[in-house]
Image (spheres, helix red, strand yellow):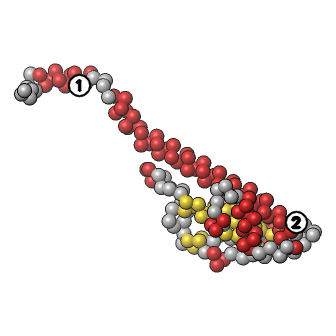
Amino acid sequence: MTARRITSPTLPRFLSRLARSRDGATAVEFAFVALPFFSIVFAIFQIGTVFLAQQVLQTAVTKSARLIMTGQAQNAAMTSSQFQTDVCNNAKAMFTCSGLKVNVQKFNSFTSVTQLNPLVNGTFNSASLSYNTGGVGDIMMVQVFYQWPVFIGPLGFNMSNMNGNYRLLMGTAVFRNEPF
């Protein structure tokens, strides 16, 4: 069997037939939009997951901060690691306990409250954390931090704000301790 060679008189006819052919057009069109489409789907999934994790952390901090606000933590002489365990018990579904970092500070007035930023050059600095549950009527700020892993998606989508493709999540509660 010999290979059929396209000669010059049949070349225009071949190109004309190729231009009219719709075989595979859908696949080619999908190939053009597939990367942007799947990139957007990936970005939506990752943003949703980060927002869900942020909300779970915030809810756990709000619940656990009540231990300090009502004096239960002070009366039980709760340590930082015990408080961390309580936060973890409220957020076990999404976080590992060892990854949670706790900062509890006392302030003189609500206007003097300043949030701690533990990031130094994209790295978490745990030396700046403190744990002081205060006393009756003290103004308190409870912060809990977690380094959430994020993935760099196609087309350069990146939600990390730390080195090593992590995003620092933070839950915060500010309140005045009740009489206990």
Coordinates of residue 43 in the picture (x, y in percent): 52, 48
- Name the side, left or right, on which 105 lies relative to 48: right
Residue located at (46% from left, 40% from top): 37
Q: Earlier in the sequence, mark 2 or mark 1?
A: 1
On screen, 22 above or below 29?
above
Q: Quadrant of residue 119?
A: bottom right
Q: Secondary structure at mark 2?
A: loop
Residue on which disc 2 sits: 70
**Residue 116 place in picture, x, y as percent:** 68, 70
Looking at the picture, does residue 72 appear above or below residue 36?
A: below
Image point 44% across, 50% down: which residue? 154
Q: Which is more toward the observer, 128 or 91? A: 91
Return the residue found at the far right: 179
Q: Is residue 172 visible?
A: no
Question: Disc 1 designates what residue?
Answer: 18
Question: Residue 9 versus residue 168: which sits nearer the camera?
Answer: 168
The amino acid type found where label 1 is placed reads: Leu
